[in-house]
Amino acid sequence: MVETLTKPVKNTTAFVDALLIFAGDYVRPEMRKIIDYGDFNWQIVDFDKFLETEFDPETIGTVVIDAEFVTADNQKKWLDIIRLLDRVNIPTILYGNTNKINIENFKMLNIIEKTSARQIIPVIKISNVYRKYIIETKNNNTDASAKDNHAQQLETQLKMAGSVQRDFLPQTLPDSDKINWSVAFMPADWVSGDIYDVARLDEHNTGFYLADAVGHSMPAALLTMFLKQAIQMRQTIGNEYKIFSPLNVIDSLNQKMFAQHLSGCQFVTCCYCLLNTQTLNLSYCRAGHPYPILIRKNQNPQQLQTRGSLLGVFDNAHFEQNSIQLIAGDKLLLYSDGAEPFIGITQENQSFAFESRFLEIANLPASQMKSEFESLVRQNRDLAEPDDITLIVLEIL
């Protein structure tokens, strides 16, 4: 549903999934495609009218701004709008890259470069889950029936968030005649504190990572959505692009997280890797995350150790990048700490001892290893604390 605003936003009684703020006399065809593609309740308003009205924050889920309309002349007005939305914790999407607004100055602002309408839809969905979760939590009272209703609403939101979160995960993996990928993703609840991606950056480079927000359920899941938007593997400027090194990716992510000043004990670990698919050289950097594991034929599995503290804790945190030459038959494993009880334990002398059950499946092909690992977890999950479990297997054929 698309409705042009003729009344102040404060008169809106229904929850608006997405409010599009634009400037000018029309909505560009590119934005119309997004509106038509998303099954949302949309409202559209000119930015001059938005600034002139009062509005109830609880009626707005996500705001979408078309960066095409941000110019040097009206930049201050746009900044006023974004600052206002940020103050009342309304997620805001700036659709289209622009150098006129510094995203790091705002905690609720995300930039999505112009690719396709499909990319922006899951961002709006998870933003709305976040808004409804915050609103329902804020408005909860002590009445028993209201609490039951609130609990049911939260469960519905969790289920929806879990579905949306999976939309952010890669739907296909970039297999080739040289490389095979396999992933086990096993949340402890409807939603997960783990997030991963495997992306082909150009014809010779693939970037992949696994990040783990400490804890699980909604707060951790919301943090993974921030991570998904904050991790930048490459940058496109005009017809040129730059692929960032693992150290650049982790250091930049740490700066963005530190700038958020996260409340409570919200910490994140991450391991980012960059694979040259032609030379099979792998570079990697980690931040407080379990060490990647290399499995090579006729050798014991080994951890690839690098130094790196938790993300977002220290402004001047030091991270270390290393590299290794992979060969045919190698497998590389990234995993979240929830998988650690099924892989091995760190002993008192700080050495890592692999579980015998893990060693039994370590030399299997990637897809079979993943399946056996999932079976191992299902059969023994009651022996470990409930936690999100993710395993990424890269196999060199």
Image: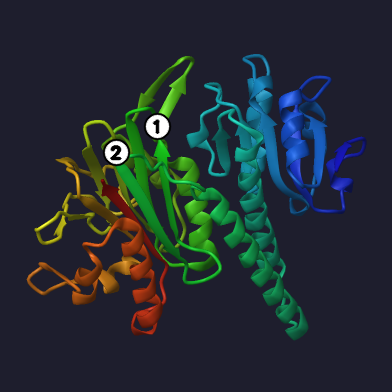
14 is higher (above) or lower (below) than 218? above
Task: Mark yes or no: residue 263 visible.
Answer: yes
Q: Amino acid at mark 1?
A: Leu
Q: CA distance from mark 1 to mark 2?
A: 9 Å
The quadrant in which residue 123 appears is top right
Residue 127 locus on image (x, y percent) = 63, 50
Q: Dot 2, how many residues are within 10 Å of its Cα: few (below 14), some (14-19), or many (20+)?
A: many
Q: Amino acid at mark 2?
A: Leu
Residue at position x 88%, y 40% in the image: 8
Residue most toward the left? 349
126 is higher (above) or lower (below) than 371? above
Mark 1 and mark 2 lie on one chain; the one further toward the N terminus is 1
Left or right: where 71 falls relative to 271: right
Residue at position x 35%, y 81% in the image: 380
Q: Image quadrant for the N terminus?
A: top right
Task: Mark yes or no: residue 54 visible.
Answer: no
Residue that numbered label 2 is attached to = 274
The quadrant in which residue 353 appears is bottom left
Residue 326 locus on image (x, y percent) = 18, 42
Left or right: where 365 falls relative to 328: right
Residue that numbered label 1 is attached to = 201
Q: In the depicted view, which residue is nearer to us: 168 or 333?
A: 333
Q: How is the image coloured?
A: rainbow
Q: In the depicted view, which residue is nearer to us: 88 or 378?
A: 378
Residue at position x 64%, y 16% in the image: 71
Q: In the depicted view, which residue is nearer to us: 325 or 290?
A: 325
| Mark 1 vs 2: CB contact within 8 A | yes
Residue 28 locus on image (x, y percent) = 76, 23
Q: Dot 1, how many residues are within 10 Å of its Cα: few (below 14), some (14-19), or many (20+)?
A: some
Residue most toward the front? 177
